[in-house]
Each structure stands twice: as structure tokens, then as C-alpha cells.
Amino acid sequence: MTIRVLIADDQMMVREGFSVLLGAMPGIEVAGEAVNGREAVDRVRELAPDVVLMDIRMPELNGIEATREIVATDSAAKVLVLTTFDLDEYVYQALRAGASGFLLKDASARQLADGVRVVAAGEALLAPSVTRRLITEFSKLSESPRPLAASNPHAYGELTERETEVLVLIAQGLSNAEIAARLVVAESTIKTHVSRVLVKLGLRDRTQAAVFAYEARLVTPG
């Protein structure tokens, strides 16, 4: 299946550059562009893309609020946040809002395409060490209310011991295959555990599960 991508960025050169890079990749189609967060939300409703490349700093509606609105509509679109800085507090807020991961704007064409494919497949873009560092640092530094964990502080008590173990490994950036190898079980079994974790915690995807694990202190930052 072709992955349809919406590019949301207020800089024309960035939009055009990503459009050219992704358009040259097999199995990926640029479905449209948006020049600000408000237009991104509207274009998601109109075009129903699989993935949204979302810049954080945009006029009218920033990428965090746009991500939150897209998630609230129960859209199937996955949001991949674009940022200039790898330790950007706004990226952490975007992950809390429901983004499935992030990429630096200077990512190579291969990294960009791989990132799109990863989130389109329902995985969290958490494998790169820089992403784990970002989540770790901002879960450690943030003293503000922690929306995901605070919304249901006892939810993780409903998890079985194995589900809790899977949640911790998700937060460490492991894929289903890597978790299966670590626990010596079938990958299909891990997929079942992940689905149950998301349902019990009321979370959208693996990225929110990872953030929840850090915020609930199931994983020690650092």
C-alpha cells in the first residue's frame, strides 16, 4: 500500500524539499501540504493522510495544538514531528499530545522515508538514542502536571506482571521483535500484550505508552 503523507511547515523551502525527497521514494506519496497548524488540521480532515510531517513552530496554530486536535478527531493519521533541535521541550509536549515520534529537519532522505514507514506501520519512532534521551530528559525535568500518568494514576496497577514488563521495554525503545527475543516468546504474543497495555491505559499508541511509563516512574530516567 502507498503511504500518503501531508507536509505541514510554514517554510516553503522545507515543504518543497521534503516533497521532492519523499516523492522519489517507492511506496510514498505526498498527498498535500499545509502552511500552518490550522490548515494542517483542516487538510487532515480533507485528505485523510496516513502520516503528517508536522513542524512545531508554526503561525495561527502551533504543531503541538495541531497534533492534539488531530488526535482528538480520532483520525487514523500518525503525526511525525519535525524539529531543528534534538533536545526541544516542545517535542516532548508533542509526544504527550499524541505524536508518534520525531525527526530532525536535517534528516537524510533515507531517514525521512524510514521514519514515515515506521510510524505508518503503527510503531513508535523511539529507537534512535536521541529520542530516548529527549524523553528521559524532559520526563526528569518536568515538574508540571503529567497528563498521561496523572489522568489515571492507578491504571498501571491493572496490568499483569508480563504486561508491565512489556511496557517498560517499550519505553526503552525496543521493537516488538526485540521484546519477543528478550522475553523468549513469539512476536505475535508481544503484539497481543501491547494491544492490551494500550487498551488498559487508554493510550493511543506506543509513543504515549513510553511517555506514560516514564511519567509513572515505571522507568527510571537516565
Image (spheres, rainbow, N blue to C red):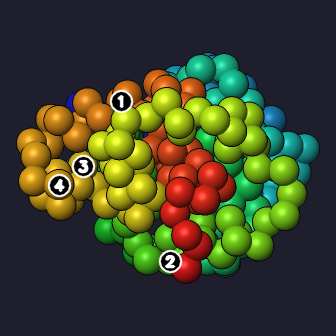
Label 4 and label 3: CA atoms lie apart by 10 Å
| Residue type (three-letter) at the residue carrying disc 3 | Asn
- Say how many tags the image has: 4
Q: In which quarter of the image is the N terminus?
A: top left
Left or right: 103 in relation to 191:
right
Q: Which residue lies furthest to the right in this view?
A: 60
Residue occupying image coordinates x 31% and y 60%: 174
Q: Is mark 2 on a helix, strand or loop?
A: helix
| Residue placed under numbered mark 2 in the picture | 130
Packing grade of label 1 (10 A; few <14, some 14-19, many >=20) is some
Helix, strand, or loop for circle 3?
helix
User: Sequence order check: which comes first, mark 3 or mark 1?
Assistant: 3
Q: Percent from the top left, x then y, of residue 66?
A: 75, 39
Label located before the other in sequence (4 or 3): 3
Q: Which of marks 4 and 1 is nearer the N terminus?
A: 4
Q: Would you name the residue on which mark 4 appears?
A: 183
- When asked about the image quadrant of residue 208, the answer is top right
Which of disc 4 and disc 2 is earlier in sequence?
2
Image disc number at residue 195: 1
Q: Residues within 10 Å of mark 3 (few under 14, many from 20)?
A: many
- The residue to which callout 3 is attached is 176
